[in-house]
Amino acid sequence: MTQRLPAFNPADATPEQKAVFDEILSGPRGNLNGPFPGWIHSPEFAQHAQRLGAFCRYRTGLPLRLSELAILVTAARWRAQAEWAIHHPIALEAGVPAADAEEIRQGGRPEFANADDALIHDFAIELHETKRVSDATYAAAVERFGLQTVINLVGLLGYYTLVAMTLNVFDMRAAGQQTLPFAE
């Protein structure tokens, strides 16, 4: 754990911290890996953020492969060590090709075999780099995924940017992380 954050001990938790701790552990994540050891020091924020995160990770309307691809793009753009370490194996298991993930980690654009992967990547890159999405990319995403899912995709990208910012500010690492995917 980083020196910037006090260690969280569930035995010493306030009732508010205990409530969010229990909800996180009983939810789909089942652990405090990621930004949660930081957020738990602000329990009301943690509660709202972890609920939004559960939606963004599991209920966007996108297949897991595409959600994880968008998360990898975000982790790479923010050079978020823990975000990449946590989501890289999930992305590979969900079907993101290892060579594509490596190209993204290095800041390049893979030669995608799947048009959906290319569209998600390009949408995420445009939004992260230009702070906008072109009319052409927007129209293609809405046509392919529908308006509601595109709204959810924007939320997913925003949420994982929040995660990356938290991890970077507090110099957090993933549980058991021994190597860093990005140079410091």
Image (cartoon, rainbow, N blue to C red):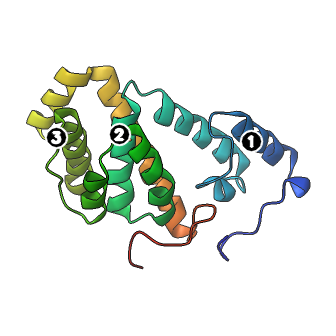
- Residue 122 in the image: state x and y as whole percent: 19, 45
Which residue is found at the position 44% from the left and 63% from the top? Answer: 80
Q: Quadrant of residue 23?
A: top right
Q: For the residue marked with disc 3, what is the amino acid?
A: Ala
Single out the mark in the foreground, 1 or 3.
Answer: 3
Sequence-wise first label, 2 or 3 = 2
Which residue is found at the position 58% from the left and 61% from the top? Answer: 174
In the figure, is residue 63 to the left or right of 32?
A: left
**For the residue labelled by badge 1, is the local secondary structure a helix, a strand or a loop?**
helix
Sequence-wise first label, 2 or 1 = 1
Q: For the residue marked with disc 2, what is the amino acid?
A: Gly
Q: Mark 3 points at which residue?
A: 113
Looking at the picture, tell me which residue is in the foreground, 8 or 112: 112
Instruction: Rate crowding at label 1 as few (under 14), some (14 to 19) or many (20 or more) other CA atoms within 10 Å.
Output: many
Which residue is found at the position 25% from the left and 52% from the top? Answer: 100
Find residue 114 and name its label. Answer: none
Q: Do the residues labelled 2 and 1 touch (CB within 8 Å)?
A: no
**Distance from label 2 to label 1 (Cα)?**
32 Å
**Distance from label 1 to label 3 (Cα)?**
41 Å
- Residue 74 in the image: state x and y as whole percent: 36, 53
Find residue 20 and name its label. Answer: 1
Q: Mark 2 points at which residue?
A: 95
Q: Quadrant of the C terminus?
A: bottom left
Q: In which quarter of the image is the N terminus?
A: bottom right
Single out the mark in the foreground, 2 or 1.
Answer: 2
Instruction: Rate crowding at label 2 as few (under 14), some (14 to 19) or many (20 or more) other CA atoms within 10 Å.
Output: some
